[in-house]
Amino acid sequence: EEGWLDQMDLTELPAALDKSLQALDAANAVRPTIITAKEQWVKRWLPSLMSKTPETATLGEEELRSEKGKALELLDALTRSGALVVEEAALHVILAATHAFDKGLVDTVVQDNLNPILQVERSSLIMASSATGMPAASLIRPEHEERVRAMTPALFLHAGGGGGEEEEEEPRTLSGLHA
């Protein structure tokens, strides 16, 4: 049985995320984040099957390239150059973004009378909906749907979760929140 991930091209995820954020995030507060790995990695391994104490070594650029080549060669050998399917494998994809505010936390709350948690919640929901391909309504608990729908109606319209015309979104203020 194929799921949404089997049909998804992960290289298209950043563009889809950008498109959703441009359409739905009126604050335009989410920015791409570049993750850079350390230049030196530490390798830990057991020198033999009977060893109890692992050894460690710091890998430079050349050693890292060599170890990566060894890992790919092992994968190639285990799968007979792709002829055997790897049934129980996991692929981890990291897509990072930073939510930036024009002002500091206190200034956002006091001067602008905005709740930054609601803004981050909206951004997170937009990103989760884009990454999973699922409508926003299916990603939140039913008891929170009314509150989130009032905060970001366009997100539910965009995902096919409602009808009617899209309206210009007003920022939700602290004084407009109900306990």
Image: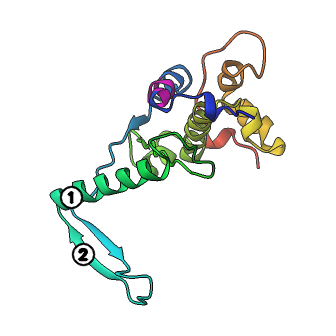
Q: Amino acid at mark 2?
A: Ala
Instruction: Based on the picture, tell me whether residue 16 belongs to the magenta stretch.
Output: yes
- Classify residue 160 by image quadrant: top right
Farthest residue, direction right: 143
Mark 2: secondary structure: strand
Sequence-first tag of 2 and 1? 1
Tell me: residue 121, above or below residue 23.
below
Q: Which residues are magenta?
A: 12-18
Residue at figure coordinates x 56%, y 51% from the top left: 90
**Relative image position of residue 136 (x, y in whole percent):** 70, 32
**Residue at 79% across / 45% down in the picture?**
141
Per the image, the residue denoted by label 1 is 39
Q: Nearer the viewer, mark 2 or mark 1?
A: 2
Q: Position of residue 74 (x, y in %)?
A: 40, 55
Q: CA distance from mark 2 to mark 1?
A: 14 Å
Q: How many marks?
A: 2
Identity of the residue drawn at 46% across and 46% down:
94
Question: Which label was assigned to residue 57?
Answer: 2
Residue 93 relative to residue 48: left or right: right
Q: Residues within 10 Å of mark 2 (few under 14, many from 20)?
A: few
Image position, residue 29 (x, y; %): 44, 34
